[in-house]
Image (tube, rainbow, N blue to C red):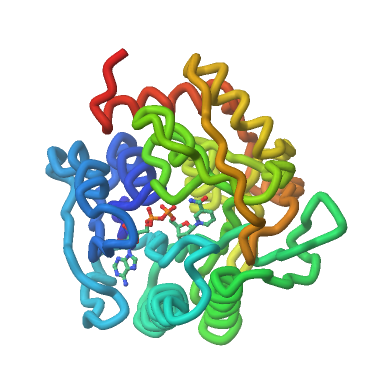
Amino acid sequence: MRAVITGVAGFIGSSLCERLLKEGWKVFGVDCFRDYYAPSLKRKNIEKCLENSDFVLSEQDISTSPLDFIKKGDYIFHLAAQPGVRKSWGQEFDHYIRDNIISTQRLLERVKNIKISKFIFASSSSIYGQSKSFPLKEDSLPMPFSPYGVTKLAGENLAMLYAGNFGVPTVSLRFFTVFGRRQRPDMAFHKAMKSMIFDKEFPLYGDGSQVRDFTHVGDIVEGILLAVEKGKNGKVYNLGSEREIALSEALRIIEKVSGKRIRRKKLEEARGDVKKTLASIDRAKNDLGYRPKKSMEEGIEEEWNWIKNIYNYNL
Ligand SMILES: NC(=O)c1ccc[n+]([C@@H]2O[C@H](COP(=O)([O-])OP(=O)(O)OC[C@H]3O[C@@H](n4cnc5c(N)ncnc54)[C@H](O)[C@@H]3O)[C@@H](O)[C@H]2O)c1
């Protein structure tokens, strides 16, 4: 089977790519190596994929390029985005509009008149915002609490409306705080682990009581593959793990796994950060057969081993 993955060098894109290649797919990967975090890390993410002759990497910016690659895949996995809640304020919002809205609309315009088997859009739990009712269900009213969330919701709405108007077989998947090997350096676990290695303080926004439905990247990739097979066109699915863990508790697990102490530097709550996320995954269970498996401890241990490796930390 032939796939196009946008954002292939990123955290989730590279993990998906590796899995597809393992399963015998041909992958055309696109990335423009934005410097939101070190492009050298992204290059490392796809090092292994580049050794596979079924993988082609094309460096281009999908917000401006002609998108001729679109015919290279029957399945389009659109993961390229400007991620991160905290940076989405002020002038930076331009980047979020460019990479999360304009790029998505351009891709959908290109696929609306050609035959493809599936268009998977990477959405986010951020579209729910500061909810009071849990678990979060797909049909509850989306009320993003950050500019980032607004742009992801716009992308999801675009996917849905191209499905309705032109029959583009889109499926949007709302990922809940993903962790594991290759986690982005702006995300909490990566930051906490890096701070221990370099004996620096870890900036803890708020008191650590914010609850997240942390989901392992392997479970996310599994959910994406299930959506390819069984996802209903025009639909949205939560991909979470149904576990509610406070950040402070997650940090304690990191300390237990690493045997080291995190030096917490308490900061004010960050604007745009919600108090809690917790997915209902009933729809993904019923329609897709999705069953997240990885425990927090296992996933954190895997991430810790990867972090030690990339920062050349020898015990
Ligand atoms: N990591 C999470 O917890 C999480 C949670 C919810 C949703 N998501 C979504 O999942 C997707 C992947 O996230 P990630 O954490 O792997 O992020 P990431 O930043 O590691 O990967 C995104 C990749 O897209 C590339 N990119 C951005 N704009 C591009 C453009 N215009 N043209 C070509 N390439 C471009 C970047 O260079 C980057 O390599 C994103 O859509 C994100 O919004 C992630």
Instruction: Please tell me which residue is depicted at 39% across the width and 68% down the height of the picture.
Output: 116
Give x and y (percent) for residue 260. 48, 19
Indicate the quadrant containing the C terminus: top left, top right, bottom left or bottom right.
top left
Is residue 52 visible in the rendered structure shown here? yes
Instruction: Please tell me which residue is depicted at 48% across the width and 36% down the height of the picture.
Output: 192
Left or right, 147 with reference to 63: right
Instruction: Please tell me which residue is depicted at 54% across the width and 70% down the height of the picture.
Output: 148
Give x and y (percent) for residue 244. 74, 38
Left or right, 301 with reference to 66: right
Q: Quadrant of residue 149?
A: bottom right
102 or 95, nearer to the observer: 95
Q: In which quarter of the image is residue 15?
A: top left
168 or 186, nearer to the observer: 186
Name above or below for residue 212 compared with residue 85. Answer: above
Give x and y (percent) for residue 125. 64, 58
Instruction: Please tell me which residue is depicted at 59% across the width and 40% down the height of the picture.
Output: 215
Give x and y (percent) for residue 306. 35, 28
Q: Quadrant of residue 151?
A: bottom right
Total marks in image: 0
Q: Dividing the image into four quarters, tell me where ligand 1 lies.
A: bottom left
174 or 99, nearer to the observer: 99
Is residue 285 visible in the rendered structure shown here? no
Give the farthest residue toward the right: 133
